[in-house]
Image (tube, grey):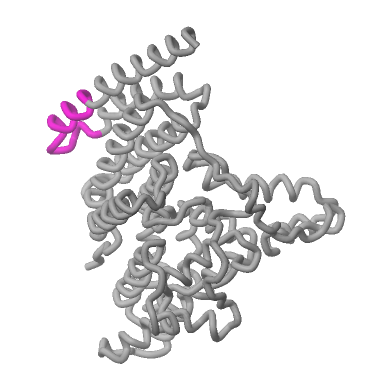
Amino acid sequence: MKVDYIALSVPVFFILIVIELAYSFYKKLGYYRLNDSIANLSLGIGSQITGLFMKTALFFGYKYVFENWRLFDLPQTIWVWIILFIGVDFFYYWFHRMSHQINALWAAHIVHHQSEEYNLTVALRQSWFQSWFSWVFYLPLAFVGFDPLMFLTLSAFNTLYQFWIHTRAIKSMGFLEHILNTPSHHRVHHGSNPKYIDKNHAGSLIIWDKLFGTFQKEEEEVYYGITTPLASWNPVWANVHYWNELWNTAKKTNHIGEKFRVFVKPPGWFPASLGGFKFAPEIDTVNYKKFDTVHSKYVIGYVIFQFLIALTLGSALLFLYAKINIYQVGIASIQVILILLSCGALLEDKKWVKKFEYGRIGLSLVVLLFFKDLPIFDNLLVTVVILQIVSLIWFFYLQYFSSNAQKIS
């Protein structure tokens, strides 16, 4: 039986986020901004939702190799578990390192690095497409003969371990800094300072970076994010913007070989005809400013309300998707993504969001027809209808107050 340890850990994630948020607020540290945190969590929800369509295929990819081509029959002893833990962490290091050194892989992984803050919500800011290729790096473990369920378990725990290191609240772990990946080491990894870029790729053990020459100690202040800021709260754009950059670059090149190299070379690579390699610029500490947007309390209240709906629906999907058909999973997933897209657009005050939001609310009522065969349909119908009526009225008054405020000003 497969156990989704990541989904089961979601409540713990949010408890720890609340604790860190309270600590930051009490100490006046400013670790959190609402718009950034909602964007981070939206990308986390979307990652889990899109992952529903790939989990089975990825598991059976590993399982197929194990069942047909494994070299050894390994017992499930404590030593085999330990060796597999080390193996998972080793191949994670190389997957992670390659994700920073190959543009096509960086196009997916970049999502995790876009936030200009560093807190526990950043740990949940994940690509919607990265898992589609990351599993290939672990196939040597299947060839050797490590059981698929053992692999899934340790792979999940490798991911879970990395949640807590996304914090500024813990400065140093003492002697453990020499062995484990710690908050200090991982802060370096998220830095856009030139000396910090492409360093500390470790999952659980920092020893790989020290062995393979990618270790960097935290020294000067870390400036978080990517060298060209995303400057958007849109979760869909966050996942595709670098692909768009690569595509536009490839179109400008003169030869088919150059077009291909755009996707397989490291970030910053350009052919000579486009100026050659562009190194990361030094941080302008004097004029440095994070992307931010200002919102009225009415917009904030509405966005939080919609985000909680998306979070609830997304969480329900994680636990119930095996009990409904693939079409219902797809329809519900689209609804979640549309809500998250709307939240991002509202935080950016996009002009198109008015028509989009009215259309989304109407569509959410129509899609209920696809769930009429569920035993809980009556309760679902009443709940969704109430939520959408509240949303419709709230959004109408939100537009009304915005219109009046503009007339007054």
What's the magenta region? 371-386
Identify the residue shown where x is 35% and y is 20%.
Answer: 395
Residue 409 vertical placement versus 2 (above, below): above
Q: Position of residue 284 (x, y in %)?
A: 66, 52
The reply to whether residue 108 is in sight is no
Residue 195 vertical placement versus 351 (above, below): below
Residue 379 highlighted magenta (yes or no): yes
Camera-side residue: 253 or 328? 253
Q: Position of residue 283 (x, y in %)?
A: 65, 56
Camera-side residue: 238 or 114? 114
Q: Position of residue 13 (x, y in %)?
A: 28, 57
Q: Main secondary structure of the magenta part?
A: helix
Q: Position of residue 62 (x, y in %)?
A: 41, 72
In the picture, residue 191 is in which quadrant?
bottom right
In the picture, residue 99 is in which quadrant?
bottom right
Identify the residue shown where x is 33% and y is 89%.
Answer: 73
Camera-side residue: 55 or 83? 83
- Left-right relation of 252 to 203: right
Label total for image: 0
Residue 56 vertical placement versus 70 (above, below): above
Residue 146 vertical placement versus 106 (above, below): below
Say which quadrant the N terminus sits in.
Answer: bottom left
Residue 109 highlighted magenta (yes or no): no
- Left-right relation of 27 to 135: left
The reply to whether residue 214 is in sight is yes
- Left-right relation of 38 to 270: left
In the picture, residue 183 is in which quadrant?
bottom left
Identify the residue shown where x is 59% and y is 65%.
Answer: 100
Identify the residue shown where x is 51% and y is 39%.
Answer: 292
